[in-house]
Image: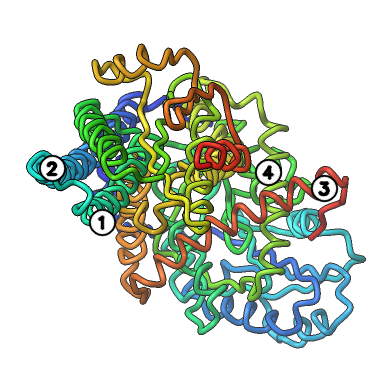
Amino acid sequence: MVFFLLFVKYYTKMYVKKKTKWRPKISVIVPAYNEEKNIRKCIESLLSANYPKDKLEVIVVDDGSTDRTYEIAKSIKDKRVKVYTKPNSGKGASLNFGIERASGELIAVLDADSTIGHETILRMLHLFEDEDVAAVTAAVKVRKSSNLIKEFQRIEYLFIIFTRKLLSFIDAVPVTPGPFSIYRSNVLRKIGGFDENNLVEDHEIALRLQYYNYKIRSSIDADVYTEVPENTSALMKQRVRWQKGGILNVINYRKMINPAYGDFGVFVLPLTILSVFLVFGITAITIYSFFSHSKYADLLGLEAMFIGVSPFTVVAILLFILSLIWAYGVVRSFKNEVVNVPLVVAYLMFYWFFSLAYNSLMIIKEIKKEKITW
Amino acid sequence: MAVKRRISISLYIMAFIFTLIIFAFGVYVSWIINKSVAEDLKANIDAMISRLQHLQTIFLLADENAPSFCPFYATELGRLEEETERMRYKIAVLEENKGVTDENLKKEYFIFETNAYLLAKKIKEKCNSSEVLVLYFYSNTNCSICQDQGVELYHARQDLAQQGIKVKTYAFDGDLNSSIVEVFKIKYNVTAYPTLIINEKKFAGFLDEKRIIDKIKEEFQ
């Protein structure tokens, strides 16, 4: 409901396309670990981007890959590309390694399994015109495929782009996505770079920027395509990491759950924690109402289903329909994306069960004190 | 470094109001649906009442020749009995699952049930039949085991029917502010729930299926 109202309020600002003549030097850091399949495409997308050649620097940081990532990156002969290799030490450390060597006024981070579009950088630049803006996020998308799990994530990512844009209007963007985000290099250095021991370093850096009251803006049309898990177990692993990392970060920054941090402090941060309880709470109520039916209903059989209806059921159906309309509307607002109603319905159903599953798994792992890794 | 932090209070209030409207709308829609369901049930009860009156009239008219009409009574009452039972469960489901308590609907149903019981009792005497009449008093507010009692009674009746023992049950909500129910309660001194009256004998407290069967069999012999 809050997002819908934000949309109504900021509808006119949502799709504003501005241009800027400002062309600062940008250093794009590409941290890579065993990405021999994707690294070439990733670098090539940067090199072919619409941006002055003398203003772009690509810093590939091979994080001790055991495959041919380093060799492939090294084989790309272009003055703009600098390739480094170092022993494996994680994504945060690789990013900081890159930041130390970056000379740009802006520093971008591009995951090695992602590619940017021809106009992506230019579409994000105008958002830096406000000097208080420290970071700009891209529109991270998933390519259409025949894999249902990927298709669900394609819809989810569109949804996230849309909501993040809305949150940027109330200074409440909670994450600068790893696949592609651009930062002001002086700010990044001033706040100490990336956290090297974080499960979700792109979430932590955004929280830190918010903590120091920097602005984060979001682009809705700066397309970046990323690779996503293609089966449920890989997706589950990713989400358990995101969820646990996210919750730990919110706990670390709990001082910000405070009216002094405006909408970010009273709405977005509490929502991260509340969402876990909501998933379990609503599921519990649903299960309870399903099993706590009158014993006479069993004697009546199927007929019992059609004897009246509880307000809870009507509200649940109503909310589902409204969510469906909203989700479909949001996804359809991306003109180049093809979606159909059954897919959105399936997405809504799947994601409910899926979030229930990964939240449960997270709790189980927590109880068993199992370590969550990348 | 200059995010001007603010809380969009009006936004949250609006969101809250809209959410409330959605909930209110949901409650309203369910109320409309349930009202029409209750009206349907009421119409069904009316139809059952008129069939019962029809049967009562025949019974009064055929007073002298009652025995020859006995098979007819048995069939008609049997049919009504089946519908009565389903109606009882429907009202219970509506009340327990969907949170709809329509007192008038229940009162009307109890009037019908009482009439059906009285007629069944008279027919039993006239036709000298061996069927067992069971009155069941329950409460929906302070008797958590009453629903189980209802189900046990149902299964006992099914079991006995297979053994050729006919049982007719008439259930009354003791909490309902109905003069008919009050008269029953006084007549049988019903003070606790559940209470079963098997062929005029009172059994207060929960009886499981087996014990119900035993008691009824005692009566039957």
Element assignment for label 2 = helix
Q: Chain of mark 4?
A: A
Checking the image for residue B71, the label placed there is 1
Q: CA distance from mark 3 to mark 2?
A: 98 Å
Q: Chain of mark 1?
A: B
Give the camera-side residue of B14 and A198.
Answer: B14
Element assignment for label 1 = helix
Q: Which residue occupies 75% across, 45% down?
A: A363
Q: CA distance from mark 4 to mark 3?
A: 10 Å
Q: Chain of mark 3?
A: A
Element assignment for label 4 = helix
Residue B82: percent from left, percent from top: 32, 51
Q: Residue A82: which quarter of the image?
A: bottom right
Number of numbered labels in the structure image: 4
Q: Nearer the viewer, mark 3 or mark 2?
A: 2
| 4 or 3: tag closer to the N-terminus | 3
The amino acid type of the residue labelled 1 equals Pro
Q: Nearer the viewer, mark 1 or mark 4?
A: 1
Checking the image for residue A204, the label placed there is 4
Checking the image for residue B62, the label placed there is none
Q: Nearer the viewer, mark 1 or mark 3?
A: 1
Is disc 2 surrounded by few (<14), some (14 to 19) or many (20+) residues within 10 Å? few
Look at mark 2 in the image and give the residue it sits on.
B64
Q: Is A52 rendered above or below residue B36? A: below
B98 sits left or right of A213 in the view = left
Does the rendering let one see residue A82?
A: yes
The amino acid type of the residue labelled 4 equals Glu
Q: Are marks 2 and 4 on the same chain?
A: no
